[in-house]
Amino acid sequence: MRRKKQVGFSLIETMVALAVLFAVGGIVMSGMVQLMKTQGTIANRTDMHTSVRSATELLQQEIGQAGRVSLASPTANVTLSAAVLAGAGATAFTLIASDNSAVTVYQNEVLTVDLGATQEVVTLASGSGASGTALFQNPHAAGAPVSVLGAFATGIVPPGAAAPNSPGSSGTVLKLYGDINGDGNMVYVEYTCTPGTAAAPGNLYRNQMSITGAKQPVDNTMILLNNVLTNPNDASGNPVPCFTYQIQPLGAGTCVTDVAVTLTVQTQNKDPQTGQFQQETKALLNVSPRNVVEVYDTASLTDPLRAQVIPPSVSALLGP
């Protein structure tokens, strides 16, 4: 009688197959875990780079725009609302914008009034809102065009005492003002850098207000970066501040023609592979406020009146 042939695996064969399966599965799982850690590292660095890049791009744009002076919106034609007469004393006047946007003048601002033979440059004895007073050498009819030339020489407020009892910019506080957004509204902006440690990182704040408004205290709604660290020392071992300035003499004062921004930040989460926070230092070495540079060149060579002085209301905002 013929015996039937048994079909299947022996116990030894099954154990060998399971061992191979477990080995392959372990290799696959190890690769998956490593891939997830690598993905976590990339995501951490991407988030860090995105946040610091957004902050530095905003800084670069606003530093470049600092010092721009405007009377009203960019599309408006600004004119005298009523005729003014030439006289020996300061004469009151009011300006209007063709698009009914707000007009802003201030004490010691230099305006160009009218066209042709009656055109003149006047310095305001006083100014607030759309009204001011000035000494006119020529009479001007209602509707005479009025423009403002040049830029604020201290659009980037220089370090030191910018005005009596009013501190200027520093290594941790960047102060700038002008028509920063290009919309005809002149604003004052402070960037405050408070570096910290890896265990307790600091913040970068941006505080904006109207140049005629009240000083706003810094709060957490103004945080641009919340992971700022102390910058590494330079090659000579000296501390590197968040902001440094290239200062040029201009008339009786100074102006800032270049700003360097250096920010060191860390990731929000620890690196899954090393268990440490990743760090990055971002440096913008030569950011020029183009309006200030232009007026510096012009005022130094041909027309000192192009360097508009700091408005009294801005001087009041420089303090704490």
Image: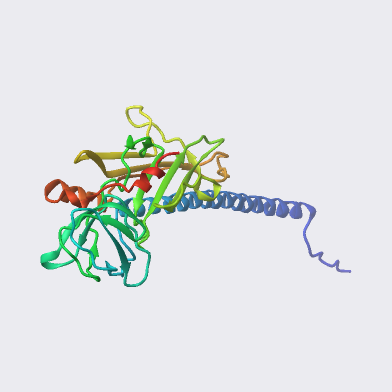
Q: Position of residue 8 (x, y in %)?
A: 78, 62
Q: Observer-nearest residue: 141 or 229?
A: 141
Q: How many marks?
A: 0
Taking the spot 17% from the left edge, 48% from the top edge, the residue there is 304
Q: Observer-nearest residue: 120 or 289?
A: 120
Residue lying farthest to the front in this orientation: 88
Image quadrant holding the C terminus, namely top left
Q: Is residue 153 left or right of residue 129?
A: left
Is residue 280 visible from the viewing direction of this image? Answer: no
Query: As displayed, is residue 175 above or below residue 230?
Result: below
Q: Observer-nearest residue: 126 or 163?
A: 126
Q: Position of residue 299 (x, y in %)?
A: 17, 48
Query: As displayed, is residue 20 above or below residue 147?
Result: above
Taking the spot 76% from the left edge, 51% from the top edge, the residue there is 12
Name the quadrant containing residue 133. bottom left
Q: Is residue 98 left or right of residue 86?
A: right
Q: How is the image coloured?
A: rainbow
Q: Is residue 3 left or right of residue 259?
A: right
